[in-house]
Structure formats: C-alpha cells, structure tokens
Image (cartoon, rainbow, N blue to C red):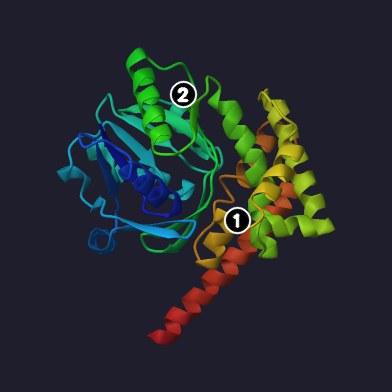
Amino acid sequence: MRIGIIGPGALGCLFAAKLYLSVNEQDEILLIDHKTERAAELNSQGILYESGTETTRCPISVSNSPESLGHLDTLLFCVKSYDLKKSLHFAAPLFAPTTLILFLQNGIGHLKYGEQKLLPAVPAFAACSEGATYLAPGHIRHAGKGHTTLGFLSPGNKAGSKQLEQLATTMQNAGIDTSISNDIRTQLWAKLFVNAGINGLTAVYNRSNGQLLTSCAARSRIKSLVREAEKVAKGLGITIEKDPVAATLKVCKQTARNISSMLQDIRRLRPTEIDAINGEVSRLGREIGITTPLNDELIAQVKKIEKRYLSSQTEANENQE
C-alpha cells in the first residue's frame, strides 16, 4: 500500500513517523510538502520523532512534486482547515477514483467534501485526539496518546470500506489507537465541542489546557461555550452520546500539559482555525436561528490577537526593507 501524508506539520509528521516505523517492506510512506526548500531540508535531515526520552530519526521520502509520484492508495490530509482547498488542488495528480482520502482537520468546515461530489476519489473523515507538539521543521514531540476514529459520512462502497479497514489496521499496528465508526459525524461533533471549549481560550489566556482549569473565569467560559455549541447541534439534529461539558473538562484535565494546536499557531505567528471551530458553531447557529454570543465573543478575541501579531509582522518586515 502506498500511503501519502499531505502536510509536514505536527500531526502530519507524527503520523508519517509512526507509520514509517511499522509498515512492511512492500508498503511505502511518503510525505508531501508544497514548499520546495522545506521538502529538501526534510529529505536531508529526516523526520525527528520524540517520544518520552527517546528521539528517533525517520528517513522518510519527502516530495514537493505530486505529479512525479503517480496515484496513491491512501492520502492523509494533515493540513490546516484554511489550507485544505489549495492542498487538494496541489495533490490532485495523486488521486485515482479508488484513492482513499482521509481528512484530519479540526472543526467541521471540511465536511462539505463528503457531502458533495467534489473529489475524484473516496472521501473519509477522522476524529483524532493524538497530541503532537511542533518543535522545528520536521521535528515533533508526541505529547500524548489519543484515539483516532475513522468513517464515511454516508455508507461507502465495498471497495472503499475495505480500504478504510486496511488503513485502520495499518494505523493500529503502528501504535495509533484506531477504530471505525458508522456515525463519524457524531464523533466529529464530539471533538468539535472539546475544541470549541478549549482551543480558543488557550489562545486568549496563553495557557496550556490544564491551566484553564485553575481559573474560575476560564472554567466558566469553557462550560458556556460548549453548552452554546450543544444547543446548535441539537437544533441540527446531531446525535450527542455524552455530556459535552463533562467530556471537555475531562479532556482538559487529561491533557493538562498539552499546548493546543491553536495556541501553537499563535506562538508561531500563524493564522488560527477559529473559523473552522467556533466560527462553524456561529455560522450554523445563524442558519437555524440560534444565537451564539459567547462563541462570537471568543471569535472576535482570537481574531484581534491574530490582527495584532500580523500587524507586528508587517511592521517588522517594513523596518527591514
């Protein structure tokens, strides 16, 4: 099986390293990056994977030329939600009608690719709670083990289902705890509740997940944000299996030392995925007539932070000219 991972960020490098270290000789793991210089650098140094006190170098093949690779059996899209559209265009030469595409984005904005026939491939979705911290290009730390659930938005054909089962087995053998769900939409919303309650607040307060629980104000906001998202989900008829607030607080405690992906983005002066997470809660709420003032407030706060550091970047660049 030829498996490609699109995007050498924290999660992409984590999956690439774990799969590379476990697959059989007849399998091939490829990392695909749109940046020519970074792809060359990663080819030279390999992917550095930290787990506990050990660091392992994985000499994974990295390419920035999809047209030279031919069709792949499976593609894992580990890019930010706002980069997904252009990443799909970049990776188009890798698609065949039987290629399984697995989306691993935060939020739910990417679900449109499963509901509409926009791709010449087989779309599947993942709800992943693996913790990965980006340290440097191609250098990541496995911050905490999680679980990855795979599934189709609608029943897949036999060939697609077999491919998904094969991928789940491959991931499981790589030490990535994996299962398949017949209702991935419910799992994605369950993850959305957690992200909506935690990620934006870590960016606003500049705190780790666990540090949010030490503040009464932050804890209260977590609960309120999640309850608001839950109200929207119920309005849309989404199945809710567990109390979203209790689940979010539990994740916050279990991942106490983790730096959320959104806070990592803020610290690296990169755009955040606030639109794909809380922004989707707000957008869908408006569609069905449910107001989301608390999520709206958080969106505004995060965007203000983004605007501030982007303005600082622009000013710094101008001063260097």
Pointer 2 or 1: first along the chain: 2
Q: Which residue is located at x 72 percent, y 27 percent?
A: 234
Q: Which residue is located at x 64 percent, y 34 percent?
A: 190
* Image location (x, y in percent) of residue 179: 49, 27
Q: Amino acid at mark 2?
A: Phe
One can see residue 293 in this view: no
**In the image, residue 287 above or below residue 319:** above
* Left or right, residue 139 beside residue 213: left
Mark 2 residue element: loop
One can see residue 218 in this view: yes
Q: Which residue is located at x 59 percent, y 55 percent?
A: 260
Task: Give the quadrant of the N terminus.
Answer: top left
* Image location (x, y in percent) of residue 314: 47, 75
Residue at label 2?
152
| 213 vs 49, nearest the viewer | 49
* Image location (x, y in percent) of residue 271: 51, 59
Crowding around mark 1 (Cα neighbors within 10 Å: few <14, some 14 to 19, many 20+) is many
Crowding around mark 2 (Cα neighbors within 10 Å: few <14, some 14 to 19, many 20+) is many
Q: Amino acid at mark 1?
A: Asn
Name the image quarter holding residue 54.
Answer: bottom left
**Nearest to viewer (mark 2 / mark 1):** 1
Task: Give the quadrant of the C terminus.
Answer: bottom left
Q: Which residue is located at x 62 percent, y 39 percent?
A: 192
Extreme residue in the left direction: 68
Residue at label 1?
258
Mark 1 residue element: loop
